[in-house]
């Protein structure tokens, strides 16, 4: 029988971690790479016999996830976030997929919730994410945020849903807006991109219209409007912070 390893990265992820790990407790190995949790994250991980790696630094989402992949020795790897739960149907599909040799990478259909409501539109539908793969056939990009699984060939698709509890409350929304906009600005700055206030305003407005109108966020009601607003704020602050990084890095005489 081929073996399966679970790769997770965490920081103060206690809210859904127990449910996440319970759904894959049948796996052969679990690796949790933690970057300084102060809640019950590590105690929960230990309860599921996870191999815990604590890191003093934060290199970004991509590099941190690659640390988790490197620590696994199983035939197959399933990369999860701590707020994602494998449904029973998906668990069965994963076990069946590992029995064949034709496909090395599989995509999972992720269904996400926003503050207690399951979202069907707003760009969150048809959210296929590559997460299950044969060991040494894939790795994550080195991006600070919005990392991608890098692999060759065509990925298959599994039956069943990956349930994603992405935003539990509005406080979480505000925290992620700040965190993701900062990481996105830093990533763009490192790539040599620059921004201005007009660019930030236009990009933010476009993010709202794209989510709410083009991606039919209005069909999700209150949640759709708030997701569009969240995307607009994240985008606006990403470019404002990018402008600020450019200003503080440029000598006064060159401004």
Image (cartoon, helix red, strand yellow):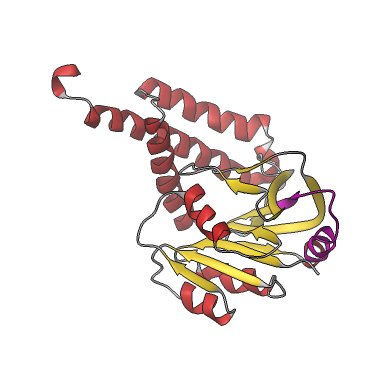
Q: Which residues are magenta?
A: 91-110
The extreme bottom residue here reads 47
Indicate the quadrant containing the N terminus: top left, top right, bottom left or bottom right: bottom right
Residue 168 visible, this angle: no
The extreme left residue here reads 253
Indicate the quadrant containing the C terminus: top left, top right, bottom left or bottom right: top left
- Pick the residue in front: 6 or 20: 6
Residue at horizontal 59 percent and vertical 79 percent from the top: 48
Residue 174 visible, this angle: yes
Q: Is residue 146 left or right of residue 178?
A: right
Give coordinates of residue 20: x percent, y percent.
63, 68
Q: Is residue 143 magenta?
A: no
- Pick the residue in front: 253 or 52: 52
Q: Is residue 98 magenta?
A: yes
Give coordinates of residue 211: x percent, y percent.
61, 35
Q: Is residue 234 left or right of residue 138?
A: left
- Pick the residue in front: 63 or 127: 63
Give coordinates of residue 63: x percent, y percent.
48, 50
Residue at horizontal 34 percent and vertical 35 percent from the top: 241
Residue at horizontal 42 percent and vertical 32 percent from the top: 188
Give coordinates of residue 180: x percent, y percent.
45, 45
Q: Tell me the quarter of the picture where residue 71 sits.
A: bottom right
- Where is 32 relative to 112, above or below? below
- Where is 50 relative to 178, above or below? below
- Pick the residue in front: 34 or 114: 34
- Where is 191 relative to 82, above or below? above
């Amino acid at each position: 029988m081929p073996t399966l390893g679970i790769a997770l990265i965490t920081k103060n992820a206690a809210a859904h971690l127990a449910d996440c790990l319970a759904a894959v407790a049948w796996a052969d190995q679990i690796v949790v790479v933690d970057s300084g949790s102060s809640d019950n994250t590590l105690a929960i991980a230990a309860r599921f016999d996870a191999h815990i790696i604590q890191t003093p630094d934060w290199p970004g989402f991509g590099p941190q996830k690659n640390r988790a992949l490197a620590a696994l020795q199983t035939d197959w790897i399933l990369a999860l976030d701590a707020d994602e739960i494998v449904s029973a149907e998906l668990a069965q599909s994963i076990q069946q997929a590992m029995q064949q040799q034709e496909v090395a990478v599989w995509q999972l259909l992720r269904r996400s919730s926003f503050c207690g409501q399951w979202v069907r539109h707003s760009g969150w539908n048809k959210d296929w994410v590559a997460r299950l793969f044969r060991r040494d056939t894939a790795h994550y990009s080195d991006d600070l945020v919005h990392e991608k699984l890098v692999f060759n060939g065509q990925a298959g698709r599994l039956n069943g849903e990956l349930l994603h509890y992405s935003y539990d409350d509005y406080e979480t929304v505000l925290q992620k807006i700040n965190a993701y906009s900062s990481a996105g600005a830093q990533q763009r700055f490192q790539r040599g991109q620059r921004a201005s206030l007009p660019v930030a305003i236009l990009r933010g407005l476009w993010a709202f219209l794209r989510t709410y109108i083009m991606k039919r966020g209005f069909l999700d009601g209150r949640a759709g409007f708030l997701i569009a607003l969240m995307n607009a704020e994240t985008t606006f602050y990403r470019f404002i912070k990018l402008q600020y990084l450019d200003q503080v890095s440029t000598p006064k005489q060159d401004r």
